[in-house]
Image (cartoon, helix red, strand yellow):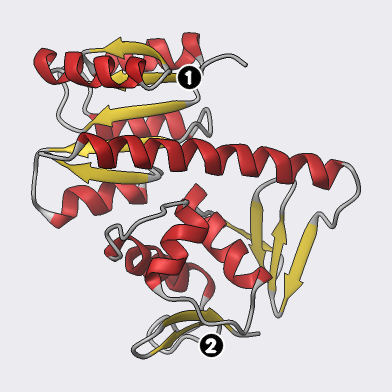
Amino acid sequence: MAASKILVVEDDHTLLGVLKYNLVKEGYSVVTAVDGAQALEFARNEIPELIVLDIMLPKLSGLEVCRILRKEMSIPILMLTAKTEEVDKIVGLEIGADDYMTKPFSMRELLARIRAMLRRTEMMRQEATSIKEGAPARIKVADIEIDLARHKVSLKGTTVNLTHKEFDLLTFLVKNRGQVFSREQLLEKVWGYEYAGDTRTVDVHIRWLRQKIEAAPSQPRHLVTVRGVGYKFEE
């Protein structure tokens, strides 16, 4: 089986070397880029299975690279940022990054997240195959319809633009409607993390989903908070 190809985009050559060394050691095939223009070129030509993308880059920022790539492909993107401001993380997620890590970070945690993201991507491929083989391709609850094959959601017949993780989260909660999940459980089930990650990621995605599918986001009917426990989807 061919090694998964990972594109690492980082303008700090020392960190880039460390990342490449550790990823190759784990058995991955690694392509590297040092600026935003290279990142776009290599992503389009090499078609990696995953991209590790720094936010602060020459020529084009990581945020702009992510924005452009999300219009062209659905490759998982893990963003790296040296900034501590929450806005940088939120913007990265909002334009389609699957997750973020703040520098300095543990190499062990980075590798764990990469494994989880690749595992999740493979699961989605398998689900797509099962749909082609006859499994239900659509889920309809209340005014919401989820097209699993086309990866699209509509509300009262109108298409709702969701990021990849928003779609994954909504689909999981709808499939398990009525059941309450903690933030940690959602990180495990939707993001694929087998450890306690940053649960704020879940809260952010829930908030965005409410803004997109709820008539009154501040008083949600479907994406309900169960105080002290987590979230659930109600019809």
The one of 14 and 208 positioned closer to us in this rendering: 14
For residue 16, above or below residue 183: above
Residue at 45% across / 68% down in the picture?
185
Can you identify the residue that label 2 sits on?
221
Q: Is residue 55 left or right of residue 143?
A: left
Can you identify the residue that label 1 sits on?
48
Helix, strand or loop under label 1: loop
For residue 197, above or below residue 45: below
Residue 33: quadrant of the picture: top left
- Spatial CA distance of label 1 from label 2 is 39 Å
Q: Position of residue 124 (x, y in %)?
A: 64, 43
Q: Position of residue 202 (x, y in %)?
A: 37, 65
For residue 180, above or below residue 16: below
The amino acid marked with disc number 1 is: Pro
Helix, strand or loop under label 2: loop
Residue at 52% across / 60% down in the picture?
189
Crowd rating for badge 2 (residues with CA inside 10 Å; few <14, some 14–19, many 20+): some
- Kindly check if marks 1 and 2 are in contact, taking CB atoms under 8 A apart as contact: no
Of callouts 1 and 2, which one flags the residue occurring earlier in the amino acid sequence?
1
Residue at 72% across / 76% down in the picture?
141
Residue 76 in sight in this render: yes
Q: Is residue 185 left or right of residue 100?
A: right
Crowd rating for badge 1 (residues with CA inside 10 Å; few <14, some 14–19, many 20+): some
Which of the image's four quarters has the N terminus? top right
